[in-house]
Image (cartoon, rainbow, N blue to C red):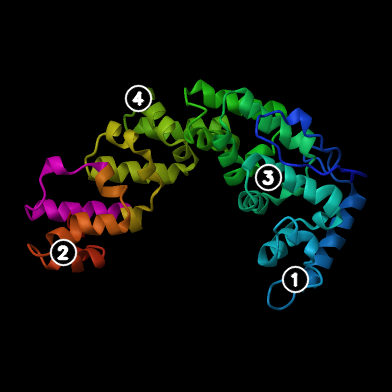
Amino acid sequence: MELCDSLPEVHPKMFGFLFASVVLVGGFSSSSKKISKPADQQKQKCSVTVSFLVNRRGSLPKTASSSAFEKVRITGPDLTRILTQNPKIWSRSVIKGLAPCYGFIKSVVFSDDKAAASLKREPRMLLCNMQTDIAPNVASLGNFGATQPVVSFLVSSYPNTLLRTKAKFAKHVREVLDMGIDPANSVYVHALKMFAGTIESTRERKKAVFRRFGWSDDEIMLALKTNPMCLMLSEKKIYDGLDFLMNKMGWQGDAVARVPMVLCYSLNKRIIPRCLFVQVLKSEGLLNEENIHLSSVLIPTEKTFMARFVIKYEEQAPQLLNVYKGKLGSEGMKLL
């Protein structure tokens, strides 16, 4: 990696995916060759320096966290974490490196807060060459039909997806489009994150778990188009969720496929307590079969669930509130 000598300031313009006009020369390239041994030694030395500057309270002294980093809205504990993990950022010129990088990100997300959040989530972007590493990937999103809000959402929420080569990033974009996901929908961003964060063999192993429970390819695709992030769950979590919802609770695969988000919830803290409590209501004759839908049980917030299923029946069965607060205890466990 080589430090650039000059970088002109970038002024945010009206978003239009015309990033060829945003000329940012130099910086660090995330796709550069492996750091040489002297560079490794320098990185170690720099890391030791950062660690030394961190005081007993876990933050950098005021002299170290100067107004230089305040210009890109990185201060306090965030600055400590970022510089400790990425000590080479110390070497970057604020005017020629950090500020233009921040300016480019802001030109995409249209917000100081979102730009800062993006860099805090993926500080390695501060070491990237915006023109060669980031801008082409951002531009390709627009070329394939992504709207500005969708691009802004991706850059601010999942900036690490941009740290791919142009070829690999374009491949992931095409994979998302091949699923039939609308590039103007926020699901597009989650799908891109999923493809960028997994490899094909891993995705196929996880799809095989769904097939073990009798899911068709259409049902799997429905789930992925609704919530692609469910394929980033571990195979065990997918299996345990499906085993409980389908084998123990009796819901069909297509019912789960329509609300795959439920697989992302905690099995012990949310799924099991709520489902078994609903079973208690049924056993008490307080709930009819047709009133129970997977989405109405697991998707609502805790406050909504309490109002809909617990407090609503408190007069008919005063013990229900205590049963739920105790996570069902023996009452619900008998239903397992």
Q: Is residue 17 left or right of residue 147?
A: right
- Could you tell me the amino acid type at mark 3? Lys
| Mark nearer the N terminus (3 vs 2) | 3
Q: Which residue carries the number 2 mark?
A: 320
How many C-alpha atoms fall within 10 Å of the one at disc 4: few (<14), some, or many (≥20)?
some
- Nearer the observer, 148 or 322: 148
Determine the residue positioned at 34% across, 58% down. 269
- Could you tell me the amino acid type at mark 1? Leu
Q: Is 181 within the magenta?
A: no
Task: State the image quarter where residue 21 is shown.
Answer: top right
| Mark nearer the N terminus (2 vs 1) | 1
- At mark 4, the secondary structure is loop
Q: In what quadrant of the picture does the N terminus appear?
A: top right
Label at residue 60 = 1
Q: Disc 1, disc 3: CB below 8 Å?
A: no
- Could you tell me the amino acid type at mark 4? Ser
Question: Between marks 3 and 2, how big is the CA–CA gap?
Answer: 51 Å
| Mark nearer the N terminus (4 vs 2) | 4
Q: Nearer the viewer, mark 4 or mark 1?
A: 1
Residue 28 at x, y = what percent?
82, 43
Residue 183 at x, y = what percent?
52, 28
Q: Is residue 181 left or right of residue 112?
A: left
Residue 312 at x, y = what percent?
15, 58
| Mark nearer the N terminus (4 vs 1) | 1
Q: Which residue carries the number 4 mark?
A: 216
Residue 19 at x, y = what percent?
73, 31
* Residue ranking furthest to the front: 14
